[in-house]
Image (cartoon, rainbow, N blue to C red):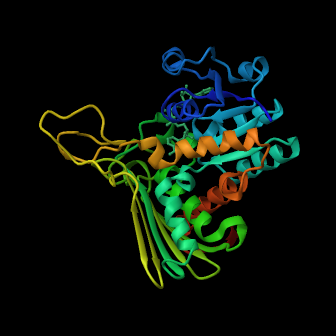
């Protein structure tokens, strides 16, 4: 077995931070290099990373990396993944796997051909609360699940790349709604056992046809419905019109019970502060008055366990499970594309996804 996993991160900002933090918590993850086009030195200093590169291809050729973390804007996921696969590295790619399903399938198939592992970073599949919810469903605690209602919503993206359809692949549905899509596939359709057969989507129109974010070319409000072949329905929501902090909630309705989870406001802490304090939860605009600060946000959202799982798979020479691999990433972007198609045609789209 390998002593440690040598890791290079491509990207140096928001997602790169939670990757670096989560790797730092694993005793056998060795963060050796970062490549990005800005924020390189501050990022490397914060996380004590020895080598920095302004060109990720140089990092791939000069460092003997086992694993590359892809934390760049969506439109670069495919090119960075293909280059890393070419260099013989395993890859953890952030969501969405790509901006188109054709690119996503190409990434999955190339990694397969090259014999490298492709991990898809759907952190919800690793969130401790959602894993516990899944265990309760699996043991029959709520009978047969019938309906899931799940969302990730906040007040707008921090990343200029995510405001532009050309670099993001869409708007709030592909950026936020993709979390519940991936997690619902994990809960109800793991390993392709229960396919999604019908999809509906409705979104605002981008730019002046958005509710609030007229500088976003993608939608700032999106709803999607997934209908599974075993009959279940799942309503997913991803919007940028939700103020007050990032709102991630899941409800599962079964024949014998209900489960409700609140990933971002479900803190055991309640704080009342007159002056406010430094940080509460992602995208919260104020920390004054009554707030519910996260105790360990990266753990709650699943990043810490996700990255530990990836490192452990490599150490133990294991392939990713369905819910952490390229097939899930491909299914997610195919379903999001079907939602966009449905929004355009105003008709349900039939297929077999998952
Ligand atoms: N799992 C999650 O919940 C989650 C949360 C946030 C972001 N993400 C994903 O992470 C990815 C990055 O998002 P972000 O919020 O960190 O974006 P960001 O805009 O904060 O950072 C983008 C990073 O990419 C780097 N970059 C841009 N072009 C590059 C190039 N040609 N070569 C090398 N580096 C380049 C920039 O230097 C920067 O460090 C996106 O795909 C996003 O969807 C996932």
Where, quadrant-wise, is the N terminus in this rendering? top right
Residue 303 location (% of width, % of height):
53, 43
Residue 248 location (% of width, % of height):
40, 55
Q: Is residue 354 above or below residue 268?
A: below
Residue 44 location (% of width, % of height):
54, 18
User: Is residue 311 shown left or right of residue 336?
Assistant: right
Q: Quadrant of residue 80?
A: top right
Q: Quadrant of residue 229?
A: bottom right
Q: Where is ligand 1, by quadrant?
A: top right
Q: Is residue 342 above or below residue 245?
A: below
Q: Is residue 22 above or below residue 32?
A: below
Residue 288 location (% of width, % of height):
17, 39
Which residue lies most toward the left here?
274
Q: Nearer the viewer, residue 173 or 109?
A: 109
Q: Residue at x 66, y 50 (%)?
A: 100
User: Is residue 290 shown left or right of residue 100?
Assistant: left
Q: Nearer the viewer, residue 1 or 80?
A: 1
Which residue lies most toward the bottom here?
255
Q: Nearer the viewer, residue 339 or 309?
A: 309
Q: Residue at x 51, y 70 (%)?
A: 136
Q: Is residue 353 above or below residue 315?
A: below
Q: Is residue 97 visible?
A: no
Q: How many marks?
A: 0
Q: Is residue 65 visible?
A: yes
User: Is residue 175 shown left or right of residue 282?
Assistant: right
Where, quadrant-wise, is the C terminus in this rendering? bottom right
Q: Nearer the viewer, residue 293 or 231?
A: 293
């Amino acid at each position: 077995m390998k002593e440690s996993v040598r890791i290079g991160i491509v990207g140096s900002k928001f997602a790169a931070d939670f990757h670096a933090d989560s790797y730092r918590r694993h005793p056998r993850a060795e963060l050796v290099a970062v490549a990005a086009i800005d924020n390189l030195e501050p990022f490397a200093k914060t996380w004590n990373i020895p080598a920095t590169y302004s060109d990720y291809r140089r990092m791939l050729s000069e460092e003997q990396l086992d694993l590359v973390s892809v934390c760049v804007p969506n439109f670069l996921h495919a090119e960075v993944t293909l280059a890393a696969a070419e260099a013989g590295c395993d890859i953890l790619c952030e969501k969405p796997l790509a901006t188109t399903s054709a690119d996503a399938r190409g990434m999955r198939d190339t990694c397969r051909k090259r014999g490298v592992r492709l991990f898809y970073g759907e952190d919800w599949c690793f969130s401790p609360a959602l894993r516990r919810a899944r265990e309760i469903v699996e043991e029959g605690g709520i009978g047969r699940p019938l309906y899931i209602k799940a969302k990730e919503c906040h007040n707008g993206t921090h990343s200029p790349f995510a405001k532009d359809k050309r670099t993001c692949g869409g708007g709030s549905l592909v950026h936020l709604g993709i979390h519940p899509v991936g997690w619902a596939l994990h809960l109800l359709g793991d390993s392709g056992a229960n396919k999604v057969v019908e999809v509906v989507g409705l979104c605002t129109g981008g730019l002046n046809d958005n509710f609030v974010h007229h500088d976003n070319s993608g939608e700032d409000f999106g709803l999607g419905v997934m209908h599974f072949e075993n009959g279940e329905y799942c309503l997913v929501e991803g919007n940028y019109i939700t103020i007050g902090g990032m709102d991630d909630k899941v409800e599962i309705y079964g024949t014998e019970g209900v489960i409700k989870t609140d990933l971002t406001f479900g803190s055991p802490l309640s704080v009342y502060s007159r002056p406010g304090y430094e940080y509460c939860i992602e995208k919260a605009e104020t920390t004054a008055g009554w707030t519910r600060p996260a105790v360990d946000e990266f753990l709650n959202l699943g990043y810490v366990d996700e990255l530990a799982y990836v490192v452990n798979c490599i150490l133990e020479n294991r392939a990713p499970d369905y819910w952490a691999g390229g097939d899930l990433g491909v299914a997610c972007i195919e379903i999001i594309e079907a939602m966009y198609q449905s929004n355009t045609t105003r008709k349900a789209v039939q297929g077999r996804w998952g």
